[in-house]
Amino acid sequence: MSQLPPPGPWRTWLILGGRGSGKTRAAAEWVRKQMESATCSRMALIGPTFADVRDVMVEGESGLQAIAPPMNRPKYEISRRRLVWPNGGHALLFSAEDPDSLRGPQFDGAWGDELAAWAKPDDMFATLRPALRLGRNPKLVLSTTPRPIPALKALLNDPSCVVTRSATADNEHFLSEGFLEDLTARWHGTIWARQELDGDLIEDPAGALWDRQAIASARTTAFEGTYDRIVVAVDPPVSLGEKADLCGIIVAAAGGNGPSRRAIVLADLSEQGLSPNQWADKVAKAYSQFGANLIVAEANQGGELVRTVLRLAAPEAPIRLVHASHAKRARAEPVAVLYTQGRVSHIGYFPALEDQMCSFGAPGFSGSPDRVDALVWALTDLILDQNARPSARNL
């Protein structure tokens, strides 16, 4: 369904998709239908470069010439940079490197491919939109693998723009054998997998305490050295039932002394909709599974009840209740500094936690940062509070 034109009225159709997800074919099929039915007779084709338009949109395997039946195959006129259909309709080819080339011509439809790779997307739209002035309802189709550029984010907020999304896996049966497996293995555990395979828009809001580049730099497959302390940190939900807040549960470890002490995040076990007995049981199992030294639990909302529930689930575990005396951002800022110092690693990829980290603190952030809260309590215990504790020295 993501490859079919959306129902209802629309001016712009934005097709977001991973590599090989069929987004180019979907847009090309829309153009073919418009031109063969004479719904459109003057089309604009725009790609990152002129070579991209020719090699992908016109002559490529999913291009307009390849998908057309022989009797309706358009002819490519190289000298005039246009594609002409047997019924007389034609499409002009444009490079997004030259926005001024769209000044003058007028169209009743347009297809722009790989918008996120355009050199000057804002300038291109400034000349393209006034050129879409022929016919009763000129439409624009854009197909791209997403990147967090302002032009794409503006389209996502445009009420006249409808969006469809498709992942590479959705089109697996039409891809060469091993293609998906190779890219999945190559990009496993990175934001590239979500962006290039799932077609997700990954961005870092301005003002957030963390950014994805810093977290990506912190990702590892093993801890250098040995742990001397492992904690399970929990931020319990206040409410109950299916609509209860998420219960943040983070497992982390640390080793080393003083400024060289480093921590590593081992697991994000956070889950929504758990009852007190359920989240306490999950914390107890994590304590046993990871061989932890301590359970750290925020008790602002539950007080001694939090300790009681945890004690029933994990009778032998040391439990430390912590109380938030500062705002969430103030508590998180020293932990964010640890990341910039290279003192925290993630063993693997925790997409939900990292999404929350990279939006926490930005203007407009809403909701309870349960995963981040648990992360902050864990790393505070493992590094910040360790640094603050007195130690003996030989004289």
Image: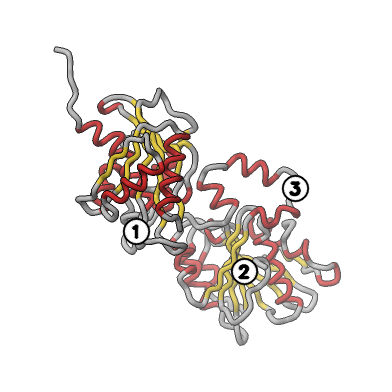
Sequence-first tag of 2 and 1: 2
- Nearest to viewer (mark 1 / mark 3): 1
Q: Circle 2 — which element?
A: strand
Asked if marks 3 and 2 touch (Cβ < 8 Å), the reply is no
Nearer to me, 310 or 134: 310
Nearer to me, 311 or 19: 311
Position of residue 267 measured from the top left corner of the image (x, y, whole percent): 45, 40
Asked if marks 1 and 3 touch (Cβ < 8 Å), the reply is no
Where is 26 relative to 8, above or below? above
Q: CA distance from mark 2 to mark 1?
A: 50 Å
In the picture provided, is 248 more to the left or to the right than 49? left
Please name the colour scheme applied to the rendered image. Answer: secondary structure
Where is 83 relative to 215, above or below? below
Where is 92 relative to 382, above or below? below
Residue 218 appears in the figure: no
Residue type (three-letter) at the residue carrying disc 2: Trp
Give the residue drawn at x 24%, y 48%. Answer: 323
- Nearest to viewer (mark 2 / mark 1): 1
Query: How busy is the neighbourhood of tag 1: few (under 14 within 10 Å), some, or many (20 plus)?
Result: some
- Which residue matches tag 3? 176
- Which residue matches tag 1? 238
Position of residue 76 measured from the top left corner of the image (x, y, whole percent): 74, 65
In the picture provided, is 49 more to the left or to the right than 299? right
Query: How busy is the neighbourhood of tag 3: few (under 14 within 10 Å), some, or many (20 plus)?
Result: few
Q: How many marks?
A: 3
Dividing the picture into quarters, in which one does residue 288 lie? top left
- Which residue matches tag 2? 111
Position of residue 6 measured from the top left corner of the image (x, y, whole percent): 63, 74
- As drawn, the residue found furthest toward the top would be 395
Q: CA distance from mark 1 to mark 3?
A: 50 Å
